[in-house]
Image (cartoon, rainbow, N blue to C red):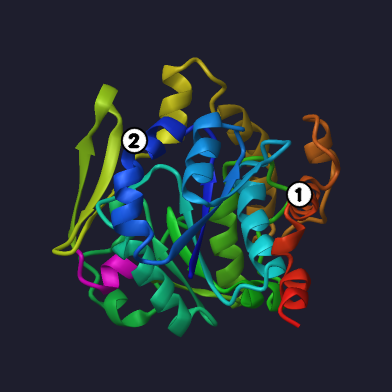
Amino acid sequence: MINVFLLTYNEQDLWCQNYPTEFVEQHFKPAGIHFIVLDNGCQPKMKAWCQEHGYTYYASEYNIGSAGGYNWIFKVAQGMGLTQAVLIQADVEMSNASPLVLTYNVTEQFGDTHFVCWPQHLNNYWLNDRSQRTAWDHRIHNLGNIVGFKPRVMHDKDCYFDDNYVVTHFDDVEFLIHCRHTGKMKWINLPYMLGFHDQKYQTGPEHAEIFVINSPLFTVKIWHASQHIAKTRGLPDHSPWYTFNKPYYDQCAANDFQRGSYDPSRWQQHGYPPYPTEYEINRFFNQRPELKKENIEHRYL
C-alpha cells in the first residue's frame, strides 16, 4: 500500500472534479494508493469522496494550515508506524497515479537523506545550471506540492517545521533553510532529475496561473488554487498570516536563521489552543485508535 497524505482547506470542488470515481478505480486503486486526508476546512464533498472510496478522512477542529499541517502529517505518519509516505496538496492535478508511485519508490531509496519533491514554480528547476543535475541536492525555494518522506527519519533528526509560524506563509521557506543550515536533509527535485523539462505556465479559469509539467508518461498541473478560490468566493485569504509571520521570519533571518523558543501565545491570540498541532494529532488518534502503531501491532499478535 502507498500511503498518501492529502492536505486540503477549500479545494473540494477542484479535487472531486479532477478525481471522479472512474479515475479512482482506473488509476489510484490499481496502484495501491490509500489517501489519508487532513481537511482544515471541514469540507463535506471531501468527506463524501473519502467515504465513497474507503479512504481515511480527518476534519481538524482548527485550521492549522500548512505550518501545522506538515508537522501533523509527519507525526501522524510516525504514529502509524509507516516506513515512508507521500504528501500532496489538493491543488495538484495528475493524469494518472505515476507521480505518486515514482515519488514513493524514489523515497524508499533516498529518503534517509533527501526529501523527494515536485516544486511548484518553473524557477525551481535551474534548467540552465547543469551542475544541479549531478549535485543530488537541488536548490528549491519551498517544499513543493508533492513530497516523499520517511517519518522515522523526521523523528530521529527532529526535522519538523517551526511551530512559531501560524497557519501559513514563511513556514516552508524557513524549513528548507533550517534543514540546509543544520545538515539534516537534502532535496531531490524529482521531475528535474527524470529529465521532465517540458514545463510551462498556463492560464486557467478566471485567469488563474497553472504550472504544468509534461512527460511521455503523464501530466502534472499545479493550480495554486487555495488563494484563488478564497478570493473568488469572498472567503478570508492568506494575507493576514503573511503580515503576522513576517516579523518573526525577519527576526530569525537577522540571527542567521536560529529558531526562537516556541511561543504558544502566537497561536493563542488567534483563538487556538497553546499546542494546536499536538491537539489535532491526539484528536485524530482518539477518533481512529486502530491506526496507532501499537494498536495495529496488537491486532496481529
What secondary structure is found at the residue carrying circle 1?
helix
Q: Nearer the viewer, mark 2 or mark 1?
A: 1
N-terminal label among 2 and 1: 2
Q: Between residues 11 and 180, which one lies in front from this camera angle?
A: 11
The local crowd at label 2, few if under 14, some if 14 to 19, many if 20 or more residues have their Cα within 10 Å, is: few
Q: Is residue 253 above or below residue 82?
A: above
User: In the rendered structure, which amino acid carries the disc numbered 2?
Assistant: Gln
Read off the residue under disc 1: 287
Read off the residue under disc 2: 17
Q: Is residue 232 above or below residue 244?
A: above
Q: Quadrant of the C terminus?
A: bottom right
Q: Is residue 94 above or below residue 216?
A: above
User: Percent x, y for residue 189?
Assistant: 36, 68
- Magenta range is 190-196
User: Percent x, y for residue 268?
Assistant: 83, 35
User: In the rendered structure, which amino acid carries the disc numbered 1?
Assistant: Gln
User: Percent x, y for residue 169?
Assistant: 57, 42
Residue 92 appears left or right of 107? left
Residue 61 appears left or right of 47? right
Which residue is located at x 80 percent, y 30 percent?
271
The local crowd at label 1, few if under 14, some if 14 to 19, many if 20 or more residues have their Cα within 10 Å, is: few
Which residue is located at x 17 percent, y 61 percent?
215
